[in-house]
Image (cartoon, rainbow, N blue to C red):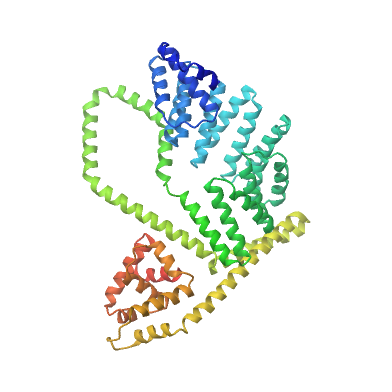
Amino acid sequence: MKAVLGTWADSIGHCPERVRMYYNLLRVKADDKAYVTHTSDSLILSIVRYYREQRDKTHLPEALYYAGRTYSDLKDAPRALEYYQRAIDVMEREELTDYNLLSRIYSQMGTLFFYQELYDELPGVLRKAYQCDLILKDSANLVFDLRDIGRSFAVRERQDSAIWYYNRAGEMAQYMQDSILLSMVYGELAGFYVDWGNYPAACEKLQIAWQAVDTLSMPMYYNNTAKYYYNTNQLDSAVYYYRKKLSLHSYSHKASAYQGLAKIARERGDVTQAMEYYDLYMLYDDSLKQSIRTETIHKIDALYNYHKFEKENIKLKKENFNHRNLIFFLVLVALFSLLLFAVFWQKNKRKEQTMLLQQEKLKRQQEKLKQYSQEQIEENKKKIEELSWQLENAVKDKDLLHRNLLLVQKEQIEKDNRRIEEMQEIQRKVEAGLYMTNIYNKFQAVANSKEKSQLLKIEDWQELQEQVDEAYGGFTTRLKELYPQISEKELHICLLIKIGVTPTQMATIMISSKQDISSVRSRLYTKLSGTKGSSKQCDQLVQSL
């Protein structure tokens, strides 16, 4: 179709506007069907404008739909949803029954809601797409619809409903004898089975999926297969599939692959390799998190309902035509209020963004450190107790498969606890070594000295920093990741906190007042955590790093 349209390109300029606009619509449609990414909205907007002005109810819904597709390609989800809803509104108003177009619209809306994590909106539009394809008897689309509905339940942890819809999609693909569709459906379902801990079912679905994996489904298959082998402690196979993922171009695939490889290297005791993989994981993962999505999500939700508000506003304007002066006055009051608080809002917004970013940094560090904490051990013990209880029930019920699965899970958690305890024992020995160093004893001597004339040299502080970093695995690096602009005085206070020096002793060492030391620690807590707190909380935070 695209080639045929190309032959008309030279002569179309001499045709009437009606013909030119229809030709342009066909061009946009041909590009979309050929998976050509739309890079500009200028052409489609001129088409929409023309058919709206002409009140062409036949072509306007389709033009609005392709405007939505264009904005989807341009990564402008709010405007895409707005145009999809406009297309639906026109079709309802004109009583048009183009189920093919409606199916595509609802399907595209479902895709946008899913990737924007607006899961509450998903089931409604997906079921509408399913109803349209049911009327059209479009078997292939029905497979996609059932899979998508299953996915909407899976992401909301409604396992029974998700499995039912995925199996319905798989049965339909089998009925069609379409092995590629079957592979896509069961390959995705296998991933959720792994997440839910149902490894036998995951293995079964992966074996079916492998029989006809196509290029589009290959990344998902690699990912779910790697997860399956990792969770069933088949680490060599897991490494093989994680390395397969590294050949994919997507940053998300590379990030998850390096994360998986880092976990395996760590479990095998190869700390150096694990750190290399983890650094690569962080490199790719950070590139995926550069944009803040909260504002976009709210904007999508608001624009999706824009058509409703627009109708209500038109109705209100008609009903309250005689109150225009009052409305105008209220607008002026609102504008005045906005101007009054504009400066404060701008300042607070920047401060809030900085604080949220700081809190996120701290949260990431605390999550990493928790993996080796006593808190993690206690959580694992609770899980072990629960699994032991379930094992007893499985033995009573003579459910051998469930018993074996529970044993694998229990052994894995027990293995994790032993690993954490080993790491903690190593940490205690390293800390004990710090307390026996000359530089530690020197600082303790100065701290306990009554003579204020004893000064520590720059070399002393550098040596203390090196010893603390060695004992606590790059403490200074983690500190500067949280607060890159940390001053020398603040860094010295953190080092003293780490070796157990009291605030009074800090004042002696740094030749300062106890009140000044307390103030610095209180401010330092805010800079590190993103929230206000006391000097004591600062000590606790620094000790936890």
Quarter where residue 452 is shown: bottom left
Depicted 59 relative to depicted 350: above or below = above
Judge left or right: residue 215 versus residue 112: right
- Residue at 45% across, 24% down: 64
Location of residue 453 (image quadrant): bottom left
Residue at 62% over, 65% down: 416
Residue 223 location (% of width, % of height) = 62, 48
Q: Where is residue 454 in the image (x, y as percent from the top left)?
A: 30, 86
**Between 521 and 262, the one nearer to me in the picture:** 262
Q: Which residue, as the protein is rendered here, is positioned at the far bottom?
A: 450
**Quarter of the image that includes the C terminus:** bottom left
Q: Is residue 488 left or right of residue 200?
A: left
Q: Is residue 15 positioned above or below 484 on the image?
A: above
The front one of 44 and 111 is 44
- Residue 30 in picture, x, y percent from top left: 52, 24
Question: Residue 211 lies in what quarter of the image?
Answer: top right
Tell me, yes or no, if residue 502 can be seen here.
Answer: no
Spot occupied by residue 402 in the image (x, y as percentages of width and height): 73, 55
- In this rendered view, identify the residue nearer to me: 539 or 474: 474
Let me know if residue 319 appears in the view: yes
Q: Is residue 93 above or below residue 161?
A: above
Task: Tally the marks.
Answer: 0
Q: In this view, does 143 lie above or below 481?
A: above
Quarter containing the N terminus = top right
79 vs 332, left or right, is: right
